[in-house]
Each structure stands twice: as C-alpha cells, then as structure tokens.
C-alpha cells in the first residue's frame, strides 16, 4: 500500500503539466511511497504524451485515458479514487504545483492527529509560477488548530472549497460514500463540504503546501476567471443547488450561510468578469440563478459591497437589463484594478461576517 495517492485530472495542460509532475517527483518524501494517478479527459494537445512519458518512467505513476469528454474534473477525480491504493488521498489541478515537502508534511500531520482530513495554507502564483508576496492565510493570525462545523468564524474562513490543499483519509471517504459531483464546476466544493459535515477530526496547518497558478488575462488564455461561458453558468447553477440542498438536508444551514456569503460574492464577480457571454445570455443566466440571489434575503446574508447590493436588488426585481448594465460598469472599473484588489473584492470582509452572525440563532 502507498502512503498517499495523488489524483490529477488532466485536460489540455501541456504547458504546465511537467511543472506539477516534477514537483511530485522532487518531493522530500520517498517517491515510492506516492502513487500518482493521472486521468486525462480527451485532451487535444500533448498532455497525453506527457502523461504516458511519466507513466513509462515511474512504475508508481498510472495513466488513465477517459473515453468520453466530461469537461469538468469530477468524473476524473472519482475515477482516480477508484484506482487509489494509498492510505490517504491528495488532489492536484494540472496547472498548479506542490511545495517541495508538501507530501511529507501533510502525511505526518494527518498521521499524528489521526484526522479525517487536513487542510493547509496555500499561495497564489503568477502564470509563470512566481509566488505572490503573501499566502492566502496570514500565518501570524491563523495558527494550527482543530476545525469545527459549529465554528462560523475561524473554521469557516480556513475551510476553502478546493480539494487541492488537503489530504483525506481514504477509508473515511469510502465509508461515507463521498464523491465529487460530475459534469459541473464546484465539484470540489461539494466534496470538501460533504467531508466536513461527516468528519469528526479536521485540522488546519499553517505551512504553505500548494501553489495555485493564476492565469493571465489575454485573448489566448481560457482561464475560467475571465472566460466563463453560458454553459459554465448553467453547470455552476446546478452545482450550487446541490451544495445548498446538501447542507439543508444535513441540518447545517447555519454554517451554510457563511459559505453562501463567500459563494455569492465569488460567483457574481465571475459573472461580471466573463468576456464571452452575450447580453442576452447574461439575462438568461441571471434569470436561472435568481433563486440563488434570493437566498441573500432568505438567509439574511447582505452583499459585502454596495455595487453588489444594487445588482442583486435588480435581479430580485426581475429588472435584468439594469442588472446587466450595472455589471458592465463594475467590469470596466475592475479592469483597471490591481490583481490583489480584484481578488479581495471577491471575498466578504469581517464586517459582513459580523452582520451575518447577528442572525445565527435563527438557523
């Protein structure tokens, strides 16, 4: 049995895939203790060639080629879990990479704490892999601690939706029959929050374990941040409905209110920043997702910025033309803002979370 199985969904990642795979082969942990499961989703570039190259070179690297294009990583990740022989599971996106001791540190942490899963600090990088100045979580503020589903402040803030800065006990995942959503984005948010709701022992470690590559904004780049299609928003709508129902059915709407606050802001800016949907498609998207923005009222979660409040008010009034106009104004302003400010706008601040907390007892 391997100590860790790392599952990597791959689709047209030839530009970055070697960086990720090399970050694994260069780990401080003995490479033979790591199983690497690469799952290609019908790439049309040289990703398969690179994947096969590593599988031929390393006997603990497995190359899987899906027979049907699924567009989203959930199917590939679920297939990877089926093939995993490790005691623990880790996940990586094909355009990101690990820090040098990520596997060793994460393995030791989950073994020592006998946890269901561990979530770690991570950092954004530029497209060329240059790290940003600060990690996502300030090390001076957030030390190592045990998370709780009843902690709506620190635990919520630390538990980001990504599966990639985490390590999971495989038996825990299998015993609770937890899977990634398939055919939709936010599949990892569903998986991670499902794990959190079922877990008893979850810990955060403040060391940086994962490097999340931010794609540059240019016409040849298909980064989701700027190129969310009409189809993307239809799929994310289905994912968000599944996540909401999952929290509601498990009796954790109080915690979900905080998740919703973050998702509301994040999704609205994805919609605002998208450059490939037409005006009519924008109105269609807002109509379909009206239920989602209605939760702002139902759950008593205000928008973190006035511009978002104005947009949501128009959505709830079915005034989609005005809502789209407001989105265009905000998009034009954001185009001139530094990346760090754009990033911070997508996250609610402490003042907003304090406002949400006033109504905790009602849920």
Image (cartoon, grey):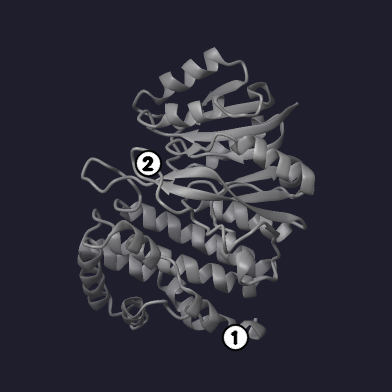
Q: Secondary structure at mark 2?
A: loop
| Dot 1 or dot 2, earlier in sequence | 2
Whether residue 307 can be seen here: yes
For residue 342, side relative to residue 255 (left or right): left
Residue 200 position within the rendered picture, expressed as x and y whole percent measured from the top left: 77, 58
For residue 173, side relative to residue 56 (left or right): right
Q: Residue at x 55, y 29 (%)?
A: 24
Q: Nearer the viewer, mark 1 or mark 2?
A: 2
Q: Residue furthest top?
A: 56
Q: Is residue 356 above or below residue 152?
A: below
Q: CA distance from mark 1 to mark 2?
A: 42 Å
Q: Residue at x 40, y 25 (%)?
A: 47
Q: Residue at x 40, y 57 (%)?
A: 234
Task: In the rendered structure, find residue 351 and report the number of the disc placed on it.
Answer: none
Work out whether residue 108 or residue 220 is closer to the camera in this orientation and state it: 108
Using a 10 Å C-alpha cutoff, classify the residue at mark 2 as few (fewer than 14 neighbours), some (14 to 19) or many (20 or more). few
For residue 59, side relative to residue 302 (left or right): right
Task: In the rendered structure, find residue 359 and report the number of the disc placed on it.
Answer: 1
Residue 265 position within the rendered picture, expressed as x and y whole percent measured from the top left: 41, 68
Q: Quadrant of the N terminus?
A: top right
Q: Quadrant of residue 246?
A: bottom right
Q: Residue at x 45, y 81 (%)?
A: 302
Q: Residue furthest front?
A: 140
- Residue bearing mark 2: 130
Work out whether residue 57 or residue 267 is closer to the camera in this orientation and state it: 57
Q: Is residue 231 above or below residue 19?
A: below
Q: Quadrant of the C terminus?
A: bottom right
Residue 240 position within the rendered picture, expressed as x and y whole percent measured from the top left: 50, 62
Kindly indicate whether the residue at mark 2 contacts the one at mark 1 (C-beta within 8 angstroms). no
Using a 10 Å C-alpha cutoff, classify the residue at mark 1 as few (fewer than 14 neighbours), some (14 to 19) or many (20 or more). some
């Amino acid at each position: 049995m391997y100590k860790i199985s790392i599952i990597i969904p791959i689709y047209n990642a030839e530009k970055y895939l070697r960086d990720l795979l090399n970050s694994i082969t260069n780990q401080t942990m003995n490479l033979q203790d790591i199983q690497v499961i690469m799952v290609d989703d019908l790439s049309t570039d040289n990703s398969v060639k690179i994947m096969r190259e590593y599988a031929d070179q390393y006997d603990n690297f497995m190359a899987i080629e899906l027979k049907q294009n699924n567009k989203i990583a959930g199917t590939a990740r679920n297939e990877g879990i089926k093939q995993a022989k490790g005691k623990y599971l880790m996940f990586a996106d094909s355009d990101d990479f690990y820090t040098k001791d990520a596997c060793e540190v994460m393995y030791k942490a989950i073994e020592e704490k006998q946890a269901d899963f561990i979530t770690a600090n991570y950092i954004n990088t530029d497209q060329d892999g240059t790290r940003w100045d600060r990690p996502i979580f300030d090390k001076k503020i957030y030390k190592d601690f045990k998370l709780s589903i009843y902690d709506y402040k620190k635990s919520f803030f630390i538990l980001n939706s990504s599966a990639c800065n985490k390590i999971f006990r495989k038996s825990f995942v299998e015993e609770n029959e937890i899977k990634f959503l398939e055919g939709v984005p936010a599949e990892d948010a569903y998986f991670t929050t499902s794990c959190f709701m079922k877990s008893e022992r979850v810990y955060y470690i403040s060391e940086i374990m994962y490097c999340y590559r931010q794609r540059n904004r240019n016409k040849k780049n298909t980064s989701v941040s700027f190129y969310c299609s009409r189809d993307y928003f239809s799929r994310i709508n289905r994912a968000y409905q599944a996540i909401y129902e999952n929290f509601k059915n498990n009796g954790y709407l109080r915690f979900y209110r905080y998740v919703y606050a973050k998702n509301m802001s994040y999704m609205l800016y994805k919609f605002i920043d998208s450059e490939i949907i037409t005006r009519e498609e924008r109105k269609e998207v807002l109509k379909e997702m009206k239920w989602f923005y209605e939760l702002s009222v139902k759950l008593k979660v205000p928008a973190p910025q006035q511009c978002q409040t104005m947009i949501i008010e128009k959505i709830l009034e079915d005034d989609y033309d005005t809502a789209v106009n407001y989105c265009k104004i905000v998009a034009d302003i954001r185009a001139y803002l530094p990346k760090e400010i754009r990033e911070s706008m997508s996250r609610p601040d402490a003042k907003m979370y304090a406002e949400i907390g006033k109504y905790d007892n009602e849920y």
